[in-house]
Amino acid sequence: MGRFCNWITSTENRLYIGWFGVLMIPTLLTATSVFIIAFIAAPPVDIDGIREPVSGSLLYGNNIISGAIIPTSAAIGLHFYPIWEAASVDEWLYNGGPYELIWELSFRLGMRPWIAVAYSAPVAAATAVFLIYPIGQGSFLMAEHNILMHPFHMLGVAGVFGGSLFSAMHGSLVTSSLIRETTENESANEGYRFGQEEETYNIVAAHGYFGRLIFQYASFNNSRSLHFFLAAWPVVGIWFTALGISTMAFNLNGFNFNQSVVDSQGRVINTWADIINRANLGMEVMHERNAHNFPLDLAAIEAPSTNG
């Protein structure tokens, strides 16, 4: 038993497992299996709680593009089963839960506490989506906020997709400039030793090429600043996403770019923003038609009162 415990918590493993991993790995495999089965064969779901089932699986008429796992009905409202990780809620709050786990693991791996700052981005986003937004809106599902016109949403999109792009670019540069420690008859990967102090690739060659490919100031000659940029870009973007969701949860719409540009006489000066805004409103009109009798964004004036 002691050897098993030591193996589970050892940082010498290629992939750290830990006690959370003992729980995570089987549940992750279960969730993946359920997702695949549901994507193929799940029956329709009453997503809006109006007795109008929506199908999302392949066997119910969808293809790879239109298929989806339909979320729980909006009729569930705020029924949310929270923390079961610790012996009590007090213990969970006192120890910091999984945030504490990430910090402790990072500290023991010599990563310094900055990894906890990076981890705060998905924590903030998950908290905003699954806790703050449902509290503000009374449901887990989306309200009509014209979110595509919100600058915080734009920053979040730039952070997520930009982070993916930069990671792919970085990976291609690294694998194209590896320092070979083996003969040509062996894989270059065999020359790498986990945790080695020597450089694994030639950053000067990689970013010398990249600076000529794009422009000089798009490249890095310092590994620390390069990796700080790779980490900070998606983290800051996701921070703004969480902030945008948290403010829109309470209908604080003042930052939204859905206002048109007007001249001194009040006449609208049409821009591409107007095109995007009207496209968003059009999508709101058409989606879930039976659930929304009239989109809130188009209800600009009060309905006339009637007598009798």
Image: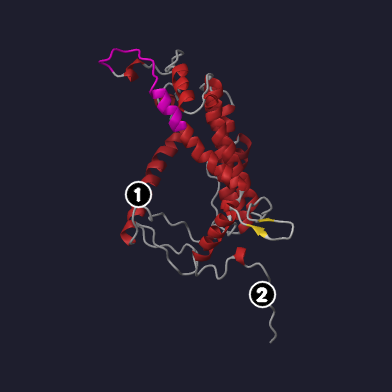
Residue tagged 2? 303
Name, please, the residue furthest toward the left.
Answer: 185
Q: Position of residue 62 (x, y in %)?
A: 35, 58
SS at mark 2?
A: loop
Mark 2 and mark 1: Cα distance apart in space: 47 Å
User: In which quarter of the view is residue 260 placed?
Assistant: bottom right
- Kind of residue indicated by mark 2: Ala
Q: What is the quadrant of the N terminus in the image?
A: top left
Residue tagged 1? 36
> What's the residue at 54%, 30% (across, down)?
231
In the displayed structure, 149 sits above or below 179; it is: below
- Kind of residue indicated by mark 1: Ile
Instruction: Give the side of residue 41 with respect to residue 102, left or right.
Output: left
SS at mark 1?
A: helix
State whether residue 79 appears in this view. no
In the displayed structure, 17 sits above or below 40; it is: above
Say which of 281 and 122 sits in front: 281
Q: How are the colours assigned in the image?
A: secondary structure
Q: Which residues are magenta?
A: 167-186
Q: Position of residue 188 (x, y in %)?
A: 33, 18
